[in-house]
Image: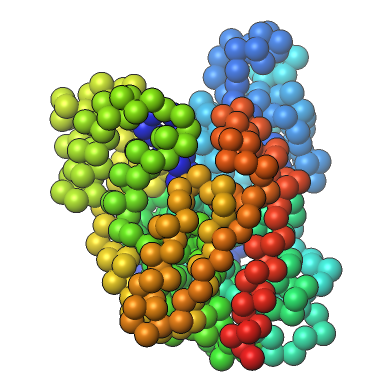
């Protein structure tokens, strides 16, 4: 799910057309830097006048560390591509593999230098409580990386298939990420956990990258992942549970009505069509952030027609940019440059248009598996528990078995907060990423584990 901060902008998962051997997924290279935007203050302290990103910390065993990049450097170019932002840097290294050539131009101590070398592979995970299996999901135009964790000393375990949210990021989560904590809790309880990268993410090789695919292509990747999971001999294929997190909660019912898993768990999603949810982003979510009602109403004159043109009328980014009605709206909300490239909120405009093809209420009504719908009390992105409860009503209305659970003091990514205002203040202060590292709420795992064990028994 997503949220809109202050005014408008939302913040917030065979035959190969190219030839790859079945096990030929070369590991991504690890740049190994923690970076931040180049602020005026950093530029002044560094006596630097130019573009780039600031290096806050370096893993000495990563590619950058091996090439002499240190804390305090300002990265200007990678392989000749100018780096204007953190997004530019991520794109520049997005397909860098181990042993690929790389050059980094950087500024440090009043000098600009260029260093060259080879990409260093990201190490594979070794888990203290699980066996970790790196595999592939191969289908037309894609070879996706999959990861299966099986708890040690547990034979034929039930499995949780984690379906990630809308952003394009890898499933190889760092240890202090709340999703990784959730995975660890499931492993400790005797469950296997299975994840599949989106096209172009992680080690995957894809004709079209995640940021350029539509929703149907994303859905197909998760579907092929499920089919590959059914062939695993290390898990109990009669006890597969889908966990749809955020937009993964849209993927889950579409797949479940066809594949019929043992159970479906959702967290941080809603039971309405995405276009209707977007309108809630521009109204109810804004109220949570304290936007004045007259401001909200004034903005509705532009943002609702904008998403209507994109999602309902399926107009191109160029058509929208050329519509003078949106000129001021797009400028005020810094949307012009990303739309010129075809993107809105980090995904291609065709992704949002195709998402509107999915009848979400109908999909939930057709799910015959047991369903657990969890909602965090302070989930700004999913806005209100009543929209999660709609899912339970849809499932039960068609003789299904839906259960609702409210997670107290919990936000959209499984974090503990004292209040909704505490969450809002953390988001607005820019401290959310740091807060994320130490405030995971294990009740998310406990509630879902208890429910899964009941369903299995």
Percent coordinates x, y for residue 190 in the rendering:
74, 80
Please name whichever residue, 243 or 113, is drawn nearer the observer in this view of the structure.
243
Residue at (64% x, 91% y) in the render = 457
Q: Nearer the viewer, residue 440 or 283?
A: 283
- The location of residue 226, given as percent across then percent down, is 49, 78
The structure residue drawn at horizontal position 43% and vertical position 71%, both measured from the top left corner, is 392
Residue 405, relative to residue 426: is it above or below? below
Location of residue 315 by image quarter: top left
One can see residue 270 in this view: yes
Residue 147 location, x and y as percent?
A: 63, 70
Q: Nearer the viewer, residue 176 or 124?
A: 176
Left or right of 456 on screen, residue 200: left
Q: How is the image coloured?
A: rainbow
Q: Is residue 226 visible?
A: no
| Residue shown at the point (17%, 37%) measured from the top left | 319
Establish if 425 lies above or below 109: below
């Amino acid at each position: 799910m997503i949220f809109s901060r202050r005014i408008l902008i939302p913040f917030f998962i065979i035959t190969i057309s190219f030839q790859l051997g079945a096990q030929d997924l070369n590991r991504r290279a690890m740049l190994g830097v923690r970076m931040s935007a180049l602020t005026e203050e950093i530029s002044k302290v560094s006596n630097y006048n130019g573009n780039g990103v600031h290096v806050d910390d370096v893993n000495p065993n990563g590619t950058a560390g091996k090439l002499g990049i240190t804390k305090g450097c300002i990265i200007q170019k990678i392989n000749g591509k100018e780096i204007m932002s953190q997004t530019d840097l991520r794109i520049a290294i997005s397909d860098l593999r181990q042993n690929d050539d790389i050059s980094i131009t950087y500024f440090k101590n009043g000098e600009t230098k260029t260093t060259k070398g080879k990409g260093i592979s990201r190490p594979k995970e070794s888990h203290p409580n699980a066996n970790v299996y790196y595999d592939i999901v191969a289908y037309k135009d894609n070879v996706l990386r999959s990861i299966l964790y099986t708890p040690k000393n547990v034979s034929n375990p039930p499995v949780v298939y984690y379906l990630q949210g809308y952003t394009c990021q890898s499933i190889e989560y760092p240890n202090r990420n709340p999703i990784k904590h959730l995975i660890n809790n499931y492993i400790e309880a005797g469950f296997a956990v299975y994840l599949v990268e989106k096209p172009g993410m992680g080690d995957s090789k894809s004709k079209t990258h995640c940021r350029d695919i539509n929703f149907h292509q994303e859905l197909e990747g998760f579907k092929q992942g499920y089919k590959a999971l059914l062939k695993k001999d290390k898990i109990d294929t009669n006890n597969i549970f889908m966990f749809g997190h955020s937009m993964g909660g849209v993927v889950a019912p579409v797949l479940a009505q066809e594949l019929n898993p043992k159970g479906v768990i959702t967290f941080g999603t809603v039971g309405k069509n995405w276009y209707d949810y977007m309108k809630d982003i521009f109204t109810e979510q804004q109220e949570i952030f304290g936007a004045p009602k007259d401001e909200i109403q004034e903005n509705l004159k532009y943002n609702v027609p904008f998403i209507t043109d994109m999602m309902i009328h399926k107009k191109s980014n160029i058509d929208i940019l050329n519509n003078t009605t949106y000129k001021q709206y797009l400028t005020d909300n810094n949307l012009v440059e990303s739309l010129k490239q075809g993107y809105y909120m980090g995904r291609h405009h065709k992704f949002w248009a195709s998402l509107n093809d999915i009848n979400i209420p109908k999909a939930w009504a057709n799910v015959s598996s047991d369903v657990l719908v969890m909602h965090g009390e302070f989930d700004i992105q999913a806005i209100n528990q009543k929209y999660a409860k709609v899912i339970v009503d849809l499932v039960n209305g068609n003789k299904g078995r839906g259960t609702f659970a409210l997670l107290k003091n919990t936000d959209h990514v499984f974090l503990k907060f004292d209040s909704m205002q505490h969450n809002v203040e953390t988001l607005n202060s820019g401290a959310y990423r740091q807060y994320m590292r130490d405030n995971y709420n294990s009740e998310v795992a406990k509630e879902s584990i208890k429910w899964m064990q009941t369903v299995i028994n």
